[in-house]
Amino acid sequence: MQDFREALARRVLVCDGAMGTMLYSRGVFINKSFDAMNLTQAGLVEGVHRAYVDAGADILETNTFGANRIKLASFGLADKLHDINVAGAHIARRAAGDAAYVAGAIGPLGIRIEPWGKTGVDEAREYFREQVAALLESGVDLFILETFRDLNEIGAAIDAVRSLSDLPLVAQMTTEEDGNTLDGTPPERFAPELQKRGATVIGVNCAVGPGPMLETIERMEAVTDISLSAQPNAGKPRDVEGRNIYLCSPEYMASYARRFILHNVRIVGGCCGTTPEHIKQIKAAVGTAGSAAAAPHVVTPRHRPSPASPATVTVMAPPIPPEQKSRLARALADGRFVVGVELLPPRGFEAEPAIQRARELKRYGVDVVNIPDGLRAGARLSALSLAVLIEQQAGIETLLHYSCRDRNLLGIQSDLLGAHAMGLRNLLLITGDPGRVGDYPDATAVFDV
């Protein structure tokens, strides 16, 4: 295969999705050591890897996220550390063949590092070295450090890798929705530090969906000049009959993948809740945009801000060709016949019946759901809100009718920005019905647009 660094420079690489989600869906209880399955159920692990290869993944992460001495000891498996890591790398290699790179996956130790805990940084580094050595022995192509919340701990992990190898290294932190780590460290601080430590690619993964992660990526781009990676969860899980269900559809995740690569993201994949179908859609979304010709412009600020002074850098992104904006736009550009069905927003706040009808329409082969706005000047659930819910939960594109009547210019701009941020790509701008025909005939009119 092409050298990993050369491939990274030429195109956007798609990483795989969740391993734990897939194993759980195939009957593995969450109280088991997923890493130990490299020894006990290698065929099942390899099957997950192969599903991601078939979906188009360029990078497979070994099933070794928790295969360090501390975490394995909690299952009485510390003495199996070497065997579990070696087996994990070999399983991934068999599945990858010549189609994908194999990344040695390393996660946090599961204990607090000084100054937050009793474990010293030097001791933590030795724990990581043990796992790195086993993966290195197995011939991985690169390393991925992921889901770290502590800058000191990921620093120890980077040092461990660099003390043994000069292979490409992806270092990923996990942040909250505000972009900061759990202890309040902002991207403006941790991004330059990860670059300085010797990572080849830096990024974020897990904990949040693609929306909040995009904002964090934008902040990282403003203070570094290194390739970035993004592996969001499939949204935030919802409790459905006692089970945590991730509701971001593959299409929704793919729409954000296209946006990530406009901000110097060169590796994009998925974390918790993502499946081979998510990766398949992401691969399709970045396939053409990820070539060298479409490589994003890297913006390096002339004066990098201090961690205490986050910078705002405005970047004019190149226009996206209409056919790349949505499936509806692509169908129209190709001259295909499109079937759309109108679905009225409810008069109350209960959206589930409408979402269920959208699911049924998708099953019958409908291409897009039309959602009218301000129908007959009546008070109904926001059409924009219903469109977001339908796209996220029913997995079908919407054509949002947007009434310019009775909205001032600032309100229209805010709504359009919000619609884009939430992944809506198809809008039909209309005048709208006058207030006098609806529920509140005395409502005043606004006609900025």
Image (spheres, helix red, strand yellow):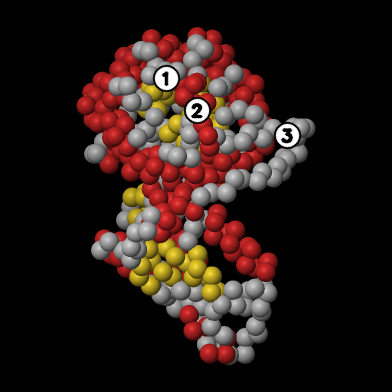
Tag 3 secondary structure: loop
- The three-letter amino acid code for the residue at tag 2 is Arg
Residue annotated with mark 1 = 2
**Percent x, y for residue 413?**
64, 63
Sequence-wise first label, 1 or 2: 1
Q: Quadrant of the N terminus?
A: top left
Q: Label 1 vs label 3: CA separation?
A: 32 Å
Residue annotated with mark 3 = 301
Q: Is residue 244 visible?
A: yes
Going by the picture, which residue comes out furthest to the front?
A: 335
- Asked if marks 1 and 2 touch (Cβ < 8 Å), the reply is yes
Classed neighbour count for the residue bearing mark 3: other residues with Cα under 10 Å, few (<14), some (14–19), many (≥20)? some
Question: Which one is closest to the eye, mark 2 or mark 3?
Answer: 2
In this rendering, the answer to whether 335 lies above or below 6 is below
- The three-letter amino acid code for the residue at tag 3 is Pro
Position of 158 with respect to 28 (left or right) is: right
- The three-letter amino acid code for the residue at tag 1 is Gln
Q: Label 1 vs label 2: CA separation?
A: 10 Å
- At 63% across and 34% down in the image, what residue appears? 298
**Percent x, y for residue 13?**
45, 31
Comparing 118 with 157, the one in front is: 157
Task: Using the image, tell me which numbered label, if any, was put on residue 39.
Answer: none
**Percent x, y for residue 331?**
38, 56
Residue annotated with mark 2 = 10
Tag 2 secondary structure: helix
